[in-house]
Amino acid sequence: MRQTIPVIFAAMCTAQVFALAKVPLAWMLGPLAAGLFWLLVRKQDFYWPTRWRNWSLLPIGYGMGKYVTLHTVNQIIVQLPGMVAATAIMLLACYYLARLTASGAGLSTASSILGSTPGGLSQMAVLGEEFENTDLAAITFMQTARVLGVVCIVPFLAVHGLAGERTAAAPPMLAMSAAPLGLAGWLAVSLLVVAGAWLAVKWRWPTPYMMGPVFTVALASLFHGPLPGLPVSVMNGAQLVMGLYLAKKFQTSEASEGATSNWRLLFFFTAVGVLLMIVVSLALAWGLASVYHFSLTTAFLAMAPGGIAEMGLTGIALGEDVSIIFAYQLFRLLFVLGVLPMLLRKLLFRSSLV
């Protein structure tokens, strides 16, 4: 415990610097960088148990589940065929890119798939712990590179490459304001989050401390109406815990030795994969815009392999239909978190790849 408080302070300072530098996921990537510096450069260990990571997933699950509204459900129902087809094509492209990366960079197939799939840095890192022979260091690196690449490239393309396709569509989903809950309301929400996590653990769901709250909070949002966001400090704290946890896992990953000798190859294949995924997103966006008659920019942000928050904020800035963007991004995220673990287990079992 002696090194824990200093490393938390260092993580907070690094997160502030990253935030000032406009680095995405600053409160996760900043602590991750600080933790790696502490462990690999200063050669000092610190105490960071798994249960702290589990607790940090609870507010993350709430933050995802609160975006599920009746409008989102309606969008998913109406455009479900397009969502299923586009998501399947995107994930199929990710799978073949992952196989290419695994072969070229010397990774296990599970590590490469989890590193290439657009499901979120923390989510894919957590899923990586559920499979044998996965390299959490490589997964973290690939997901971080993907997030940084997408956040830098996609808004630039949306503004400069697709500017002629933009519309003045209102963002109805974010326009809905949530009424304050009060102390009793927050207590009820907290109990709901904990109950969701407990049930998910009992039912052996993948990433239960996150997926359980996602579904219970989503149900609450559907019946109660829009729920307020958590304080920024709470979400930042959850990201900080996850960032330092990933640093610890980077240090202790038994399979990381095989990847660290091939970082240059891994960087090359990851960069190529990010660019190809963006190209696939553009092609899918063109097809969706043609079928459902919304702007190409809206469709591109809906399919881009980035996060819900980043793509949603870009849509707001461009005056796009944020409800469409949220619906597609949320559907893909829930599909990845709910279905990918089962598909990956079957794939790896049948092919005996791990």
Image (spheres, rainbow, N blue to C red):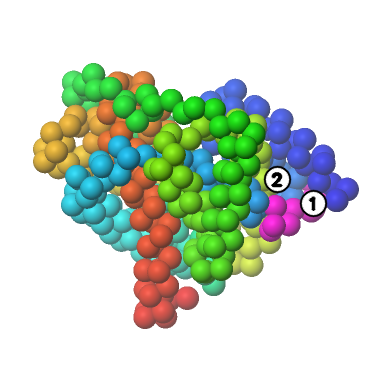
Q: Which residue is mark 1?
A: 46
Q: Secondary structure at mark 1?
A: loop
- Quarter of the image for residue 209 reads bottom right
Question: What x and y, as percent, mark residue 313?
Answer: 40, 28
Say if 104 sits above or below 241 in the image. below
Q: Is residue 243 visible?
A: no
Question: What x and y, as percent, mark residue 215?
Answer: 45, 52
Question: 290 or 71: nearer the eye?
Answer: 71
Q: Is residue 75 visible?
A: yes
- Quarter of the image for residue 60 reads top right
User: Along the polypeptide, which appears first: circle 2 or circle 1?
Assistant: 2
Question: What x and y, as percent, mark residue 250?
Answer: 64, 56
Q: Who's the residue at 68% across and 61% down the image?
A: 252
Q: Which residues are magenta?
A: 41-52
Q: Is residue 301 left or right of residue 212?
A: left
- Taking the magenta stretch, the answer to whether it contains residue 267 is no
Q: Which residue is mark 2?
A: 35
Q: Is residue 78 left or right of residue 265?
A: left
Q: Amino acid at mark 1?
A: Phe
Q: Who's the residue at 49% across and 55% down the image?
A: 211
Q: Amino acid at mark 2?
A: Gly
- Quarter of the image for residue 310 reads top left
Give me the C-alpha separation between circle 2 and circle 1: 9 Å
